[in-house]
Image (spheres, helix red, strand yellow):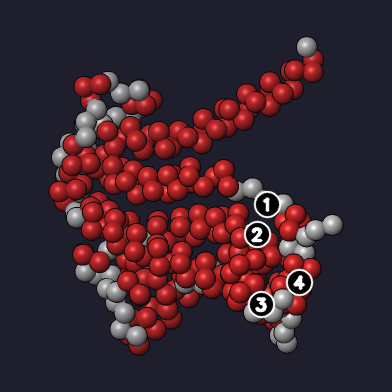
Amino acid sequence: RPGRILPTLRFTVLLVGALAALVPFYYMIIGALQKERDTSVLGLLPLPRNLTLDNFVGVNESIDLLRSLLNSLIMTAGVVGCTLVFGLLVGYALSVLSFRGQGLVFALVLLVQAIPFQLLMIPLYVMVVRYFNLADNYLGMILPFAVNSVAVLIFRQYFLQIPRDVFDAARIDGASELRILRSIAVPLVRPAVLTAMLVTFIGPWNEFLWPFLVTKDATMQPLAVSLANFSQANSTFQANPMGAVLAGACVLAIPAVVLFLLFQRHFTSANLGSAVKG
């Protein structure tokens, strides 16, 4: 029937697009499992005898994989925690409270969005490493990313959707602003919290340049930096050096994929207006 042609065509186009987007991830996994690298099209369907887990074993023997993962986890957890705390506080202040200079603060938040991190890297390096002496330190890796302007904007937009009657009623009952934020505002913007967590997690988890600058001790380097050093130092590693690098990339990608699969069903807007009676 003509009415079914358009939905079928739309589904087909979306399916092809989804498969095309998954090809790089599939190639990464297949490349990590290949005993001998095959860059041809036929390499996408490798023979069983060319599949092995030796690349993962080789990476683990060449670098301290668990230690590097732990470093990445500590850095990422610190950044996510700071982002949620400061993002909620600033987003709440910009959307719910009224104070002098509120518009200026919001303009500064937007300005930060327009400034590339690379322009700030040199002064940040001088401040963190030379002034604060935080080289080879978790705090030195976390501080430049502690406040995320994207998270601030996400929380601000969600807080703006909450009816002001909710906050006014809580204030009449004698609740402080921190109590209102913790007990009323945050539960109503749970989708924003989950979204900010995922968006923030991906950045520091895959961050390479800043940790590379501030960590020279191999025991303090996150996985992305350890893999880069492994790639440079082991160009003649086994029959498939690129397979070992792809194996490390798979390990780096797994937590982000798992986190998305766990939280993706929560990325829907809540019915914020349901908090008001009548």
Residue 82 at x, y percent in the picture:
47, 70
Where disc 3 sits, the SS reads loop
Which image quadrant: the N terminus?
Answer: top right
Residue 33 at x, y percent in the picture:
27, 33
Q: Residue furthest right?
A: 278
Nearest the eye: 251 or 113: 251
The disc, 1 or 3, on the residue closer to the chain's N-terminal end is: 3
Q: Do the residues labelled 1 and 4 touch (CB within 8 Å)?
A: no
Q: Point out which mark residue 270 bears.
A: 1
Q: Mark 3 points at which residue?
A: 175
CA separation in Å, label 2 and label 1: 7 Å
Q: What residue type is labelled 2?
A: Leu
Q: Which amino acid does label 3 sit on?
A: Ala
CA separation in Å, label 1 and label 4: 20 Å
Q: Mark 4 points at which residue?
A: 169
Residue 276 at x, y percent in the picture:
78, 60
Residue at 36%, 38% in the rendered image: 28
* Residue 114 appears in the figure: no
Q: Mark 2 points at which residue?
A: 188
Q: In this view, does 130 lie above or below 150?
A: below
Where disc 2 sits, the SS reads helix
